[in-house]
Each structure stands twice: as structure tokens, then as C-alpha cells.
Image (spheres, grey):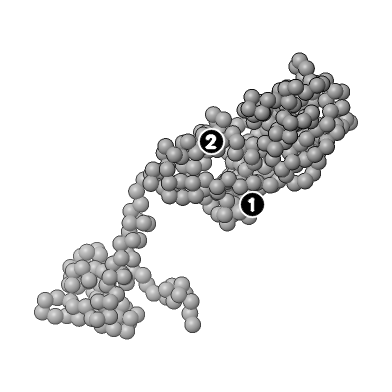
Amino acid sequence: MARPLAALARVDLNLLTVFRALDETRHVTRASRLLGVSQPALSHALRRLRDVFGDPMFVRTPRGMALTPLAESLAGPIREALAQLESEVLERGPFNAAVLSRTFRVRTTDYLEALVTPSLLTALAADAPRVRVAALAVGTSLPRAELESGACDVAIAGFFDDVPTGFHQEALFHDTYACAVRRSHPRVRGPGLTLDAFRAERHVLVAPGGELTGAVDRALARQKDRRQVVAGTSAFLVAAWICARSNFVVTAPSRLLSKLAAPLGLRTFAPPVTMPVIRIVQVWHARSDADPAHRWFRELVRDVAARA
């Protein structure tokens, strides 16, 4: 048995417009004018329509063309299908976020969730109240397969170095690193720690992949130095919370630590080692690039991130 799509491919769907024109006019000449074709061309199309369905479909009467019982049963579904095609495909109006009903799935880190999500949700509540956002952990690399399939709409992080062909990226903002300890830390006074004092402290880092080395360790290794890492956590917020309740040190993006310092009782200071700039980008697949709703969402994320 042929699959439905394969069977449909063998039918000239233009014949459905011929059906509707004859259904509306009940007259070959008027139907040909409605479609902008010659009367012989429409008569030929009617013969093909009859062949496809194995039925006369339309028969002549003194008052015009009359539908056969089969045509009567098909008239409603064909009218509805063509009307929906016209409204949903051919007559799509300009994009309107206010009536958009959609869930956008974003792979990102808790650092960016904390910075961007509050303002993003506020903007959505005002401009697109039926839009929802599902923020999911991004892991340690670009979620390529999910972006390709559409399971994920956008990925946002600071470690997507080489974006492969078929993907687009946009820089959102740059950040720097800062260190943080609890305000009553017994060994941190004044502007912070010297390099020797920094190395002597016990450190917590964010290691979603389970590794216990990070950007600080790579920076130290370049100058043939090292520090003592005692734990890795899966999230920046957890690492900051641990350090707020202990004498450990965390090094994390400065924008996040500046927002957490007062609520958690943290003291922040500049790392005593030269650190790279954090470049935050959003990445999406080419399949979504031209979609008006997707483009609107990316622009909203960009605007909100610029103010984070």
C-alpha cells in the first residue's frame, strides 16, 4: 500500500482549485475566468479531475453544473483545506509578538540565566504574554544536534570557540573575571590577594563536565604556577554560595559576582593573574535564521543582554 504522502504526490493539487472554482460558479466559462485560464484548458482539467476520482464530479443541468454525491462529500473538506492554505501560507500578515504562542528552548549556563532571564521574562510579559522560555543546562560544548533538529532554539555561552558551517552566531557582550570570598574571610583584606596568597588559598570552581581545572588554572600554568582546587560544582550560583559560607575562594564572571555580592555577603576583587576576556555569544542553526518569530526572540535576547 502506498504511503499517504506518496499517493498525494501523484495528484496534481491544482485540480483542487479547479474543483473549488466549479463548486463556486457551477459554470465552466465563469470558472475559467475565475482561474484566469481558457475554457478548453479548464475543460481538460475537469476531465483529469474526473479521472483522478473515477467519478463525473460535475454534470451539466439546465441551471448549470451540479455536483455528484461524491463531489458533494468532498466539497466541504476541499474548501476548508484551501481556505486554511490561503490564510496560513499565502496570506500571512506581518509578525506580531503579542499573539505569538510558542516556547523557546535555550541552552545556557546558570550565570547567563541569572543575568538575562529576569529582564527577559519582564519584557515577554509586556510584549508577548503567550511566549514561554525553557532554559536548559548547556553542558561543555555547543549542542549542535539539538540546534540542527530544532529541539533547541538558541545556545548562549562564553565557550563556543569554533562555530561550524551551517550555524550563525552573534556577540551579546563581554565580561571579565573576578574573585569572591565571604566578607569576614580571615585572610582577605584591602584590595584582595597577592599571587602567592591566592595560590595558598583553597579554591572552588565551576566544572559542569567534572574536570577540576579551569580558566584560572590554564592562566597559572602558562606562568608555570598552580593553585589548590578542593571542589568543582555544576553551577556558578552554587560555587558562590559555598564560598559565602566558608573560607574558600571562587573565580567567576564579574557581572554575576557583582550581583551576588550584596545578597550573599561576598567581597570581590581582581584576580592576581592575567585572565582572558569572556565573550558571550548566542548561536543558532541556519534552519531558524529567517523565521520571523525566531529572529524577534534573538533580537530580544540581544537587547536584554546588552543591559545585563
Using the image, determine if residue 36 lies above or below residue 285: below
Closer-to-camera residue (262/161): 262
The quarter holding residue 229 reads top right
The quarter holding residue 25 reads bottom left
Q: Is mark 2 on a helix, strand or loop?
A: helix
Using the image, determine if residue 99 lies above or below residue 10: above
State the image coordinates of residue 247 (x, y, percent, origin top left): 79, 28
| Left or right of 66 in this view: 77 | right
Q: Which residue is drawn at 68% across and 25% down?
A: 265
State the image coordinates of residue 188 (x, y, percent, origin top left): 79, 20
Disc 1: which residue: 144
Which residue lies most toward the bottom here?
54
| Left or right of 280 in this view: 190 | right
Using the image, determine if residue 254 lies above or below residue 22: above
Which residue lies most toward the top here?
190
State the image coordinates of residue 96 (x, y, percent, origin top left): 38, 44
Q: Residues within 10 Å of mark 2 (few under 14, many from 20)?
A: few
- Residue 53: which numbered mark, if any? none
